[in-house]
Amino acid sequence: MKWLKIFTPFVPTAFLFAVVTIGQCQPNPPPAYALDLKEFTVLDNYQPHLADAVKINASPELPEPHQGTIAPLRYVMTLDLPPVPWKAPAVKPVALGKPTLQPLPNLFARLGFGTQFSPLVEVDFSSGRSEKFNYGFRGNYTSSNGALENQLYSNAGGSVFGKYFLGPVSLGLNAELGTETVYFYGYPNDDTSFARSDVRRRFLKTGIALELG
């Protein structure tokens, strides 16, 4: 049997001897892995360094890989729905009321005045919303009177419209009448002059349309 010699300045020698004696009388069981026993002599003022240590590599034994086929795993999951105390509420039909048509402005008018003595008048009228019919009219007038001879212009017109509803079908009528009068001017007024009727040109615009939708 090999002896373990230990000397340290912090612990009495008699105590170390007792410890060594007890350790010899009651030996520990050998470890699971076998290591060579070596004798170490610890001297005074000994300071161990990690760089002086010897690393012991312990390589564990790995089990042999499975060579056979792996059986497929099967899982069975049962569906368990706990009962919930719930009763559907009784839903009663609700009658929807007839929608009310919102009133809209049915009259529009515009007045204006510009240079060259140019008045402007526009008027629009409509009967408004209705489930059976709709009608109205439009009118406009504008003119100018400049300082030069025959520097004149005028435009006037109007139209009426109406529409009658027959379920998914509607019947409509539009009629228009308008006139536009222009005068040729810009010639030298010192030595040239024309009568107003000679330089006047008047255009008449009419139209009528029927609609079925």
Image (cartoon, rainbow, N blue to C red):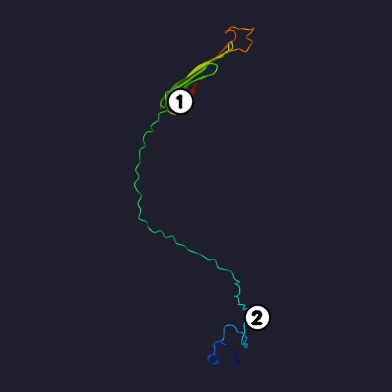
Residue 183: quarter of image: top right
Q: Do the residues labelled 2 and 1 touch (CB within 8 Å)?
A: no
Amino acid tagged 1: Ser
Image mark count = 2
Q: Alpha carbon of mark 2 to alpha carbon of mark 1: how far?
A: 109 Å
Mark 2 lies on residue: 52
Q: Nearer the viewer, mark 2 or mark 1?
A: 2
Q: Badge 1: few (under 14), some or many (20 or more) residues near its Cα, within 10 Å?
A: some
- The answer to whether residue 171 is seen in the rendering is yes
Dot 2: element: helix
Residue 43: x percent and y percent?
62, 88
**84, 22: nearer the viewer:** 22
Residue 199, disc: none
Vertical comparison of 19 with 184: above or below: below
Mark 2 residue type: Asp
Residue 95: quarter of image: top left
**SS assignment at label 1:** strand
Q: Count residues near mark 2 (Cα–Cα under 10 Å), then give few for <14, some for 14-19, many for 20+.
A: few
Which residue is nearer to you in this view: 25 or 191?
191
- Give residue 23's position: percent from left, percent from top: 54, 90
Residue 213 position, x and y percent, is 48, 26
Judging depth in this view, the residue of 99 and 1 nearest the camera is: 1
* Residue 205 visible in image: no
Picture coordinates of residue 68, whole percent (x, y)? 59, 71
Horizontally, is 189 left or right of 120 in the view? Answer: right
Give the residue displayed 65% in from the left and 80% down from the top. Answer: 52
The correct choice, above or below, for 105 with respect to 10 in the image is above
- Sequence-wise first label, 2 or 1: 2
In the rendered image, which residue does mark 1 sit on?
A: 170
Q: In which quarter of the image is the N terminus?
A: bottom right
Which of 196/8 is in front? 8
